[in-house]
Amino acid sequence: MVQLSSISASERLDRLRLIRSENVGPVTWRQIMERYGSAGAGLDALPELARRGGRKKPIKICPKPEAEDEMAAIEAAGAHLLTLGEAEYPVAMAVIYDAPPVLTILGHAHLLLRRAVGIVGARNASAAGVRFTREIAAGLGAQDLVVVSGLARGIDGAAHQGALASGTIAVVAGGVDVVYPSEHQALYEQICDQGVIVAEQPITTKPQGRHFPRRNRLISGLSLGVVVIEAALKSGSLITARMALEQGREVMAVPGSPLDPRCRGTNDLLRQGATLVENAGDVIEAIGGMILSQADEPQSDLFSYAKSADPSAQELESARDLVHEKLGPTPVSVDELMRQCHLTPAVVFTILLELELAGRLERHPGNMVSLL
């Protein structure tokens, strides 16, 4: 089996600095790592890339002392930092388009390497929904599957409770040390003891509305499939289901009464082709092929970074106007951009990287980009 990369403390710190630098998101971070081979080299390249993208003022690079303070706070909380490419990083999430470059982990990190199923649903869940969730989570745990959820009220909390004995992963929207909602303090402590807490946001971060969709992509990213139990038509749980589909994961839903608004979202998922599940056995059957297809698959060395060749200055200069012309406020897929421009991926990726670091490009789900 090929081992994923083992990195030094200084490289880990540089990786943290890179993602905390201005205009560097998950996709940009990964492209920089693939192009320059190390975070240190990527940090050195940021100012010139941003200048070439049209930025007038210097880009803000995370200072080393600031990153060191964050690392010290993580250690003081009893947690540790995990970066994309390290052996403990969950392979299921590593392959998604916008995998988080750094995760803060509190608890039993080995659970991240086991097969997992996400369970999400209504915060104002019914008593029957809560009972059903606990039962299905316990049933999945009995089949050696880890249950992933978001530590929210209602269905999320019930999913964690049902899976405590077998292993559960709580993905939080804020910092790994911030309990939200506060009423889940006891459950949070139980998960720290028996499961694992995972956060993408820096430690001590209070969760805000914009953090929850990002949290949702981690729930689906860690999972072979996602089960939705009681969700209204505009529920955040449906965002998780959509992200699961984009990531190539199984989407499952529990049917409910058409008279209950909490079930309209799940029933709509079923109309759109989600797999109907009524018990843990149905979930096992739905993801069984995924388990079998991955069971004997060796870990590939996809995420050990080696410096790649840069396009020449002449190539980039002649291509910039064409790429800029094809971009606008309406998102377009990067693949379509390459087809229309008749340019190599290296040239297009570099120009988009320059624009993003200059603060002129926005990335969207599904490998789409637009000009700001």
Image: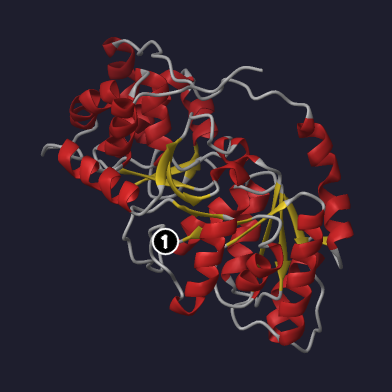
Q: As drawn, is 87 to the left or to the right of 133?
A: left
Task: Give x and y (percent) for residue 168.
Answer: 63, 57
Would you say 8 lies left or right of 4 here? left
Looking at the image, which residue is at 31% across and 51% down? 76
Badge 1 is on which residue?
A: 211
Amino acid under label 1? His
Q: Residue at x 80, y 40 (%)?
A: 291
What residue is shown at x 31% (from left), y 10% (from top)?
312
Establish if 270 lies above or below 59.
Answer: below
For the image shown, how many numbered marks are present on the structure?
1
Vertical relation: 102 (above or below) 263:
above
Residue 136: quarter of image? bottom right
Q: Nearer the viewer, residue 269 or 169?
A: 169
The residue carrying pointer 1 sits among few (fewer than 14), some (14 to 19) or many (20 or more) residues within 10 Å by Cα, namely some
Q: Residue furthest left?
A: 57
Q: Is 79 rendered above or below residue 33?
A: below
x, y percent for residue 217: 55, 53
Quadrant (top left, top right, bottom left, bottom right) of the N terminus: top right
Q: Relative to the observer, which residue lies in front, 142 or 116?
A: 142
When asked about the image quadrant of residue 46, the answer is: top left
Location of residue 337 in the rendering, given as x and y in whole percent from the top left corner: 48, 32
